[in-house]
Image (cartoon, rainbow, N blue to C red):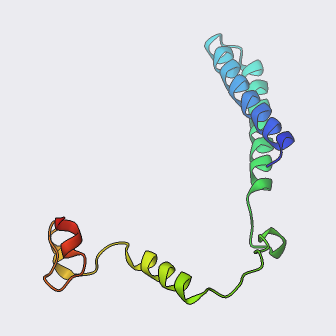
Amino acid sequence: MTRADKALVVAFGMAVFLAVSKGGQYIADARWPYAAVAYAIAGLSLAGLLREVGRSLPGDYTDDLAVPAVTRPLSPRRAAREARRASEGTCSCPRYWDTAGAEHDEWCPQRYRSTA
């Protein structure tokens, strides 16, 4: 989202807020035609706001995909480190899940890490 897009989102958001506020004041004063105009302006501003926000969201188009950097094959050492990081998440032993993380099975390698 560029600065101009952000400025338009803020402008449309403020317009919606002010038009709805003013429309409520007109309803309280029983000025129905003015209230209708204020809410019409709020609706148009809301449509503009949604359009601006929708433009910045990525879709299923190929031009929205980020081009990945050139990747090199992982060295065995780095591959082992990445695999270890991925496997260190949560424990998969049944006792860990049954006790909500309070205990590990005797064979679980994380049992000794959690008691230290």
- 84 relative to 28, above or below: below
Location of the C terminus by quadrant is bottom left
Left or right: residue 88 versus residue 80 is left
Left or right: residue 81 versus residue 8 is left
Q: Position of residue 16 (x, y in %)?
A: 72, 31
Visible in this render: residue 21? Answer: yes
Q: Position of residue 6 (x, y in %)?
A: 78, 40
> Within the image, what quadrant is residue 107 found in?
bottom left
Q: Please report the residue visible at 74 percent of the width from the left and 63 percent of the height from the top.
A: 58
Q: Position of residue 34 (x, y in %)?
A: 77, 19
Q: Nearer the viewer, residue 75 or 107?
A: 75
Q: Nearer the viewer, residue 5 or 52?
A: 5
Q: Please report the residue visible at 83 percent of the width from the left and 40 percent of the height from the top.
A: 3
Visible in this render: residue 101? Answer: no
Q: Position of residue 71 (x, y in %)?
A: 72, 81
Q: Please report the residue visible at 77 percent of the width from the left and 44 percent of the height from the top.
A: 47
Left or right: residue 58 versus residue 107 is right
